[in-house]
Image (cartoon, coloured by chain):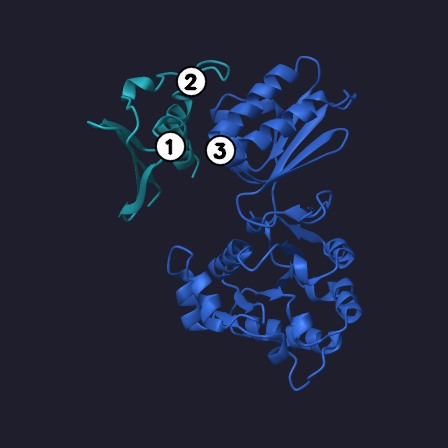
Chain colours: A cyan, B blue
Amino acid sequence: MVAMDAVAGNVVQHGGGHGLLVLARAHCHELRCRISDRGPGFTAEAIPDLAVGINGAGHGQGLWLTRLITDDLTVIPKAVGTTVVFAMRWNR
Amino acid sequence: MLASDPEHPGTLPVQQMRAGDHAFLCYDDHLQGWDVLSAFVWTGLARGEKVIVFPDPRLNAADVLRHLNDVPGVLLAQGYDSGRLELNSMRQLILPDRTFTAAQQWRRIVEETESAQARGFTGLRTYIDMGWVADLEADLNVMMARERQAEHLFTTGLYSEICAYERDRFPQQVLEAMCQAHPQNLLPALGHLRARQTDNTLWLVGEADLATREQFTHALAEAARSPVTRRGLTIDLCGVVFLGVECARELIRMMDRTTAHRPVRVRCTGSVALVLRRLGADPAVIDVAQVKGS
């Protein structure tokens, strides 16, 4: 939920204001979330490598946290906009 | 206009209701309150409870089911088909009596609770739209006395109840009295955030996300400006069912700014603490509390 909120919030604030969120159970123990927008676009390089200080750059912090708490985070730049995909896996 | 008493110490989001709670809900018109009802039903079914809804008597069953079926997933539809979710009316419940008395209603609720338990349910929860008062032409004073003296229904921890009052159908003083008569006071809809502050503690209840960030930030700023006391400031997030990244960042920034001249501690659930710690909050100032119903 926190990860979905972070990425969807990013879409609302920086990605053109609206997008499409698809949440699906991919395997028995995996939930996969795909969020697409038609905003100005960004790449995975926008995500800081290390924990940004809380008073540091604001942009990218939600995605940084998403990468930290999810199992996969992929940023797919499109001709128009961006798609972010991440997964949550739980113990078998 | 006052939705319900903002100072009520038992204010909580419906997601945190638990077995044994007796909650007041005030809604503004027939379009509001459905999300609270749906969440209440959904949570009850997920916890293995029997759920009985006493909707506004002016609505027919098809309308009620249509609203409930707006909830994503199949839990509610399956619950209704299997009898775990039931629609009823106060008129029907108190039969063979035709006039409402608290004694008859209590007796029937106890019977329903015992029946649910005997059938393997973990408990019974009911949503009672108080529109039944007009439908049965019941005396308001009789209804109010029932509400004030119903605590014995809840002592076993097997029964929980929402009493939902449509604002326009009851005098304001009745609503205020009934809000006080209930140990729990529900936020009027999902997605709300409410702040309450005393000298040393800021209580935040509900959902802290992008939609409520401004309100969240304002409450933090007010708390930071409040007179400094020796005990410092506690920010109690135990009533927050969701803390988004943006609000978490606002909180950590505020703590960083304020701690220099005033100690700040945060009391919250484990999941909220996890988000705060991951975003860089000092673990030493976070107290994790067990929250009933979460």
Assess disc 1: are there few (<14), some (14-19) or many (≥20) residues with their C-alpha within 10 Å of its C-alpha: some
Rendered position, B157 above or below B186: below
Q: What residue is shown at x 53% (from left), y 70% (from top)?
A: B59
Q: Secondary structure at mark 2?
A: loop
Left or right: residue B147 versus residue A88 is right
Q: Secondary structure at mark 1?
A: loop
Instruction: Find the residue positioned furthest to the left.
Output: A79
Q: Are marks 2 and 3 on the same chain?
A: no
Q: Which residue is mark 1?
A: A17
Q: Are marks 2 and 1 on the same chain?
A: yes
- The reply to whether residue B282 is visible in this rendering is no
Residue at mark 1: chain: A
Amino acid found under the numbered disc labelled 1: Gly
Q: Which residue is mark 3?
A: B210
Q: Which residue is mark 2?
A: A51
Q: Which sits in the foreground, B75 or A38?
A: A38
Q: Looking at the image, tell me whether mark 2 or mark 1 is earlier in sequence order.
A: 1
Instruction: Find the residue positioned furthest to the bottom.
Output: B96
Q: Are marks 1 and 3 on the same chain?
A: no
Q: Secondary structure at mark 3?
A: helix
